[in-house]
């Protein structure tokens, strides 16, 4: 009798377990590990926003494990690592996506995106749905949310007054390593040099480069003001990042867990955007107090040159038909 009950009990338990599906496997398998790799520092607004908000909101079923300063994967290799199942999350960019999906290069064009609100409306609307689907289908990466990263400005260690693109002729401007970034450097009139983000401070300190471009909050967080003399407010790219998530991991989550991950991403990215907007507004005075010259050049001359170069570039041949007008039409 005992044996029979035991067998029936075992069968019933296994059937219940099968019906519960992932609930049982997730429960027994413990928390899902979400490794995130970024070249950014631990003090960067994006890093802090993800730790304080995203990590907390998914904590009942996932362990968020950030790796800063390129210590897990080198800048620009994260998307392939996620696609190969060796990484779960990263903070990616249109420039990195464009390397793998040429249509994305439209979002690397200088003077196109107008700022955080424009970015949010573009990527939370049909354009975002279409462009995110390309990434899911081609890379197995799910972009959870856009975040404003700040507007990129020139930051130089040389004294030369910069008013128009002609003034950047021969200036050795560090730009991140992808083709899209190098093209942006040329579109500004400079001589672009590829260099990893984590090497930029030393490059400025030693004179290996004449300058770099990043949003003001990054210039402060990385203390670039210690080794540079001026900030030229070209405002050449309202920059944005995307919280990238492994589709393989996403597909294993329950619908409730997927909803929590999505909400956690949106909450974190909204907070990061607000922090960067607020911080950016205060930083001109900060850099002037640090002894840097901070001034606005003839921005129109930079805008006109850059937009012409992008429209005539090979990049534009890959832009989805009508997409440029659709992006500009988002108010
Ligand atoms: C940089 O290398 O200058 C850059 O700002 C490029 C961005 O796309 C992004 O990779 C960023 O670095 C890192 O997140 C570090 O801030």
Image (tube, grey):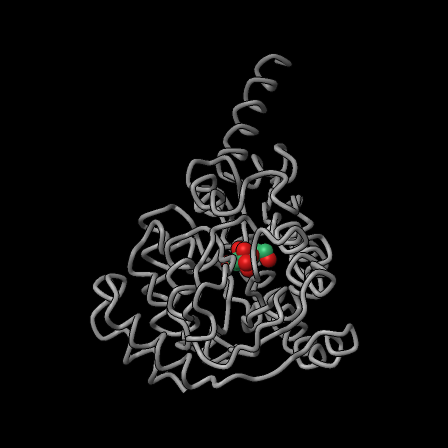
The reply, left or right, for residue 232 in relation to residue 314 is right
The reply, left or right, for residue 270 in relation to residue 111 is right
Q: Residue at x 57, y 71 (%)?
A: 150
Q: Please determine whether, in this image, residue 231 is positioned above or below residue 101.
A: below
Q: In which quarter of the image is the C terminus?
A: bottom left
Q: Which residue is drawn at 57% across and 73% down?
A: 160
**In this orientation, does residue 259 appear?**
no
Position in image of residue 78 (x %, y %): 49, 44
Name the foreground residue: 304 vs 123: 304
**In this orientation, does residue 187 appear?**
yes
Name the foreground residue: 176 vs 114: 176
Q: In which quarter of the image is the N terminus?
A: top right
Q: Please determine whether, in this image, residue 271 is positioned above or below residue 54.
A: below
Give the residue furthest to the right.
289
Position in image of residue 25 (x %, y %): 56, 34
Q: Residue at x 61, y 83 (%)?
A: 295
Q: How many marks?
A: 0
Position in image of residue 64 (x %, y %): 66, 46
Q: In which quarter of the image is residue 30?
A: top right
Name the foreground residue: 309 vs 5: 309
The reply, left or right, for residue 48 in relation to residue 165 is right
The reply, left or right, for residue 313 in relation to residue 218 is left
Name the foreground residue: 159 vs 54: 159
Position in image of residue 63 (x %, y %): 67, 44
Ligand 1, by image quadrant, is: bottom right
């Amino acid at each position: 009798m005992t044996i029979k009950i035991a067998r029936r009990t075992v069968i019933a338990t296994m059937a219940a377990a099968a019906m519960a599906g992932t609930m049982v496997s997730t429960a027994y398998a413990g928390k899902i590990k979400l490794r995130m790799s970024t070249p950014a520092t631990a003090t960067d607004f994006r890093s802090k926003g993800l730790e304080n908000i995203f990590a907390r909101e998914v904590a009942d079923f996932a362990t968020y494990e950030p790796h800063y300063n390129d210590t897990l994967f080198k800048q620009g290799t994260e998307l392939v690592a996620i696609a190969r199942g060796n990484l779960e999350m990263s903070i990616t960019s249109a420039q990195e996506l464009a390397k793998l999906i040429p249509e994305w290069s439209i979002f690397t064009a200088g003077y196109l995106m107008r700022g955080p609100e424009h970015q949010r409306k573009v990527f939370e609307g049909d354009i975002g749905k279409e462009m995110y689907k390309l990434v899911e289908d081609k890379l197995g990466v799910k972009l959870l949310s856009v975040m404003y990263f700040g507007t990129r400005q020139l930051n130089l260690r040389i004294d030369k007054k910069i008013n128009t693109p002609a003034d950047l002729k021969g200036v050795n401007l560090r730009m991140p390593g992808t083709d899209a970034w190098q093209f942006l450097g040329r579109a500004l009139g400079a001589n672009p040099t590829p260099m990893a983000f984590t090497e930029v401070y030393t490059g400025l300190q030693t004179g290996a480069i004449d300058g770099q471009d990043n949003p003001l909050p990054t210039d402060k967080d990385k203390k670039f003001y210690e080794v540079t003399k001026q900030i030229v407010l070209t405002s050449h790219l309202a920059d944005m990042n995307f919280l990238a998530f492994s589709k393989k991991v996403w597909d294993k989550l329950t619908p409730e867990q997927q909803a929590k991950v999505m909400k956690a991403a949106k909450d974190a990215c909204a907070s990061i955007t607000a922090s960067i907007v607020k911080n950016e507004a205060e930083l001109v005075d900060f850099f002037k107090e640090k002894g840097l010259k901070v001034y606005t050049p003839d921005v129109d001359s930079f805008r006109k040159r850059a937009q012409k170069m992008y429209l005539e570039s090979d990049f534009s041949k890959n832009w989805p038909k009508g997409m440029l007008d659709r992006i500009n039409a988002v108010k």
